[in-house]
Amino acid sequence: MRDVHKDQQLRHTPYSIRCDRRMKWHSEDEICITTWRNRKPPGRKMRQNTQDGYTRNWFKVTIPYGIKYDKSWLMNSIQSHCSAPFTPVDFHYIRNRACFFVQDATTASVLKDVSYKICDDENRKICIFVNHSTALPVKNKLKPGQMEMLKLTMNKRYNVSQQALDLQNLRFDPDLMGRDIDIILNRRNCMAATLKIIERNFPELLSLNLCNNKLYQLDGLSDIIEKAPKVKTLNLSKNKLESAWELGKVKGLKLEELWLEGNPLCSTFSDQSAYVSAIRDCFPKLLRLDGRELSAPMIVDIDSSEIMKPCKENFTGSETLKHLVLQFLQQYYSIYDSGDRQGLLGAYHDEACFSLAIPFDAEDSAPNSLRKYFEDSRNMKTLKDPHLKGELLRHTKRDIVDSLSALPKTQHDLSSILVDMWCQTEWMLCFSVNGVFKEVEGQSQGSVLAFTRTFIATPGGSSSLCIVNDELFVRDASPQETQSAFSIPVSTLSSSSEPSLSQEQQEMVQAFSAQSGMKLEWSQKCLQDNEWNYTRAGQVFTMLQTEGKIPAEAFKQIS
């Protein structure tokens, strides 16, 4: 969405205070409770909606496959089994589901109890889900004539070839103003009408521009996840969003590009890294933010709010499992050693745990190379403070990646890695990784350390893994490990007539080999052919691999 963002006005500096939130899910059919630690959630406080004059204490009731049932029969059946009377608000069908809203927790609780107590004509029990809702019910829906005019206006703004819809500054569109139609997208009814038109008329929409619409909340936009799930690019620049918390309402989108500059929320972050980290926490697949390229993320396509699906194949002793783990480790350590570890957010489950340990205490005459890890060490043998035992256990993927980002920058010797898969079930894979790495900056630059890392992972989407537990043990490397570390000089892989490679080029070859899966000599050739432009080499590799033009002997053999 390069050409959507044209107005280059003064930007808010993107820096912040991190949102600190915990989500508790009791079960799939129970109410979701959000608790905030230490302070109230950012953004606007609990207030009355300026459009309709009611508070946000709403719950959404969803009946899967409810479209099969008549509204009157369904409502009468639920009411007859409900221990208290209730008034459904904004009953509607979306996809194959029936949905409506109720306004208090007591009603929500009794409706939840009705689940599976009603049977249809085929004697099938009807399931009812009740969840706290940030999206509000729609009141004062647009009239048919207004809807038709809005649809015509949106058709004029739709780019068919790019599957892009430009709705920037929509309220002041001449066609709408000429007919006294006031479309204010902060109003739930206006946003709902807009999304309804998108669902019916632009089902393949990839890019949506909502720039300059004075949006201060995204309650109404939350339905875009269901009505326009294919959107990859979203422009929310030059609006009035005050908190990144609002973005959580649309985090179900698989966004690759997002524009936020010109919103107050951008000035609430302490630095660029914190800004990117907070936004990527909502959108792990994000590749560009405010027009700037981000480091490639490690993506595990999994929805943590759903029950994880088991592997479809029994991996016992299979080559498929070996390839899965090898590919996972290559991608993980490629990002870990890149200098920007925020790309690892997508590798961890939302509620994952991480701990680090080293084999000494502060009173020992410890080598300087390990002292950097002491403050984060959770060695239960030497740790006596019960408070620290809990504090040093990093919980949630955000805390984990923040902790990893604070550790020294490294380069792992992938040729040294040994993997032991010691437990495998249909739902879980446990394996340990042993190897060596060296630090690449600071006083200990070049020093070699050994590590053992234990991962517990579950099946993710796209044939990947999702880490739920990660334990890292770091120690001094033995003399033998130090001597053999990084013993494969990349320069010897080229012919003697070619000049030797610089240290930077050798590291590029190692990283490209780890990321592509190709042998070192093939990785070097690919980089040389592209004048050592790493990004261009990666693009050429991807294109040739897709076309099947890279021979099998170019890739590493999996033992």
Image (spheres, rainbow, N blue to C red):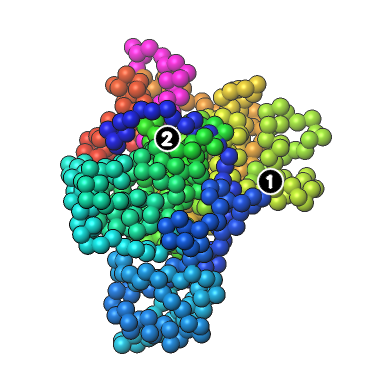
Q: Which residue does the image show at 34% across and 87% down from the upper left?
A: 123
- Pick the front one: 300 or 334: 300
- The quarter of the image holding the N terminus is top left
407 or 323, which is in the foreground?
A: 407
Where does residue 296 sit, x and y in percent of width and height?
41, 36
Q: Are marks 2 and 1 in contact (CB under 8 Å)?
A: no
Q: Nearer the viewer, mark 2 or mark 1?
A: 2
Q: Is residue 216 left or right of residue 380?
A: left
Residue 184, image x, y percentages: 35, 50
* Residue identifier under label 2: 261
Q: Which residues are magenta?
A: 495-516
Mark 1 element type: loop
Q: In this orientation, which residue lies closer to the viewer: 230 or 476?
A: 230
x 37%, y 69%: residue? 90
Q: Nearer the viewer, residue 451 or 515?
A: 515
Q: Specify the quadrant that holds the C terminus.
A: top left
Q: CA distance from mark 2 to mark 1?
A: 35 Å
Compared to 251, does 477 lie above or below? above
Q: Point out which mark residue 392 bears.
A: 1
| 126 relative to 454, above or below | below
Q: Main secondary structure of the magenta part?
A: helix
Q: Residues within 10 Å of mark 2 (few under 14, many from 20)?
A: many
